[in-house]
Image (spheres, coloured by chain):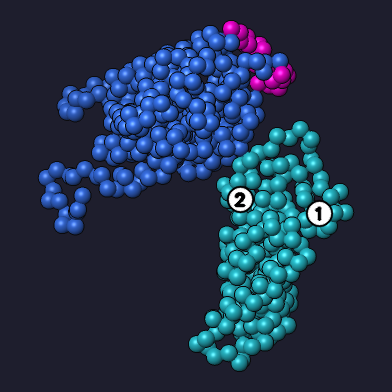
Chain colours: A cyan, B blue
Amino acid sequence: MTVNAAEITREGLWKNNVALVQLLGLCPLLAVTSTTINGIGLGIATLITLVLSNTLVSLIRDVVRQEVRLPVFVLIIASIVTIIELSMKAWFYDLFLVLGIFIPLIVTNCSIIGRAEGFASKNPVGASALDGFMMGLGFLIVLVLLGMLREIIGFGTILAQADLMFGAGAKALTITLSQDYDGFLLAILPPGAFFGLALLIVGKNLIEQRLLSTSQAIGGAPASAS
Amino acid sequence: MSTLSSPFVTPSAGTNRMMLNVLIALIPGTLAYIWYFGVGLIVNLVFAIGFALLFEALILWLRKRPLKPYLSDYSAVVAGWLFALCIPMHSPWWLIAVGMAFAMIAGKHLYGGLGFNPFNPAMVGYVVVLISFPQQMTTWFLPITVSGEAMNLVEAFSYSLGFSDLQQWDALTMATPLDQYKTNLGLNMMVSEIRQSPVFGDFGGVGWEWIANWWFLGGLYLLYTKTIRWHIPVSMLGAVLLFALIFYVMDPDSIASPGFHLFSGGVMLGAFFIATDPVSASTTNKGRLVYGCMIGTLVYIIRSWGGYPDGVAFAVLLANMCVPLIDYYTQPRVYGVEPPEDHHH
């Protein structure tokens, strides 16, 4: 299988985006995106897990027997997530309290075992690490966008509680859009996550449609639709 | 055109006539509401029906459907009207706009429009604003007979549009009878103590109980015109009555009476006007009984042990969800055909 970096990047960020196209990892995606900071926190944790697990799985791909590969992958992922959980407890304790159970639950995020099985176990280390990074980045971007959307509609702020992530000095990062905004609780509650994700998927499909029609208008088949 | 051969049944009116009957049946209760609580309801009605039509027109235009036949079938008017009756009087205009947008766009047209919506659109809109704006949705105004004054139409409009604020009218607001039961029973007060509050009448709240009577009368008109059938109201009211009676008999000092449960909150309006929505309710007679029973039971459960003082809207939506299943298991047998072997109903 030949792989090139540009293709991996396009797959991870857009064409095969974990959250918008594969619709994997919806449980943490829907549960923690009530604010931008929560989205960033979980997104980064997932990103690190993906990069490390893809790298490790790729390194051992010729050593592990076919029959036991899935338990081994799970073991690797679980170890990485445990390390991340302990690190967060050490350095981002407040954020860890907010994200709670969803940090250890990264283990069960289907996209991670999916990339391990579907990509890392068949590709060299460099490509696998890049794939993990791009898939994780695609997931992170959606988490942040969804968190931002819900936070703006729900509370009328952006980056509230930034101090949880970036230390006490980051309080100034919080942007309050309107002082006398009463808030729209639905956006913060679980239904808001479904509405928000659906709107993001609609947005992606609209952009894709627009791109397709412009590239057809210019002439010929859509560019590089591999 | 008159037909000379059978069938001799005149074609019964379509959606238009049905919805018109519902509107006619709503009039006495609505007038009673205005009589007891003031003209603020008119503001609710104007905004709710206006926004219902506006959002219906908008989504029809987006879906490239003809506007006139859909806008003139009165279904949006009924949804707006019911929504206006459910929310507190003097609600801000934007709250009504948000509710109607969700009712018409998410509740009705995203599922395919009239006839395809599994949920009652008015209740979808109501629940959205109920869970989103707790402060506005618990600001209820006292009946005129208790407070002695009310806003006039101009004041009510300017209040809803945000030109005057609550401080001026603060003395006129109070918790609803259902709310008082919920809060005060939680504080271990006796029913007899709770009922000392001036908002209580003979059964339910002052005003509320009489409005409920007029909903009942409107419901009888709907039954008389065969707009609805008896199954849903009877089974829903029966279930509320049964549960209320059982628990009341067990502990009359700290449980609200069955009469209170029937004549307060949204039970009477819900039984005849909301649960009977022909699109989202069950469509078989046996199913209607199950469906009504389910709503009545859930209303009692939510009122007694849930987080909200009233539960009609939640109960209706939860029962809406079960309708496909109920309908599946209550299909009447086709006459003249052997029942299939694997039919174990």
Q: Which of the two residues, B71 or A94, is positioned nearer the viewer here?
A: A94
Q: Position of residue A223 (x, y in %)?
A: 68, 68
The answer to whether marks 1 and 2 mark residues whose Cβ atoms lie closer than 8 Å is no
Alpha carbons under labels 1 and 2: distance apart: 24 Å
Say what secondary structure mark 2 lies in: helix
Rendered position, B102 above or below A136: above
Mark 1, other Cα within 10 Å: few <14 / some 14–19 / many ≥20: some
Left or right of B182 in this view: B21: left
Give the percent coordinates (x, y) of residue B172.
Answer: 62, 15
**Disc 1 residue type?**
Asp
Residue drawn 64% across the image and 25% down it: B92
* Tag 2: amino acid: Ala
Could you say which quadrant of the image residue B26 lies in? top left
Residue A226 position within the rendered picture, expressed as x and y whole percent measured from the top left: 63, 73
Residue at x 73%, y 53% (from the top left corner): A36
Residue at coordinates 64% horizontally, 88% vertically from top-left?
A: A60
| Subunit that carries the residue with mark 2 | A
Label 1 vs label 2, nearer the camera: 1
Seen in the image, is A221 located left or right of residue B249?
right
Out of B192 and B279, give the one closest to the viewer.
Answer: B192
Q: Considering only vertical position in the picture, is A116 above or below B102?
A: below
State the extent of the magenta-drawn residues as a range. Answer: B148-167
A37 relative position to B283: left or right: right
Q: Which residue is mark 2?
A: A193
Instruction: Using the image, name the chain to which the residue with label 1 belongs.
Output: A
**Residue A23 located within the stretch drawn in magenta:** no
Asked if the magenta segment contains residue B149, the reply would be yes
> Which residue is disc 1 drawn over?
A163
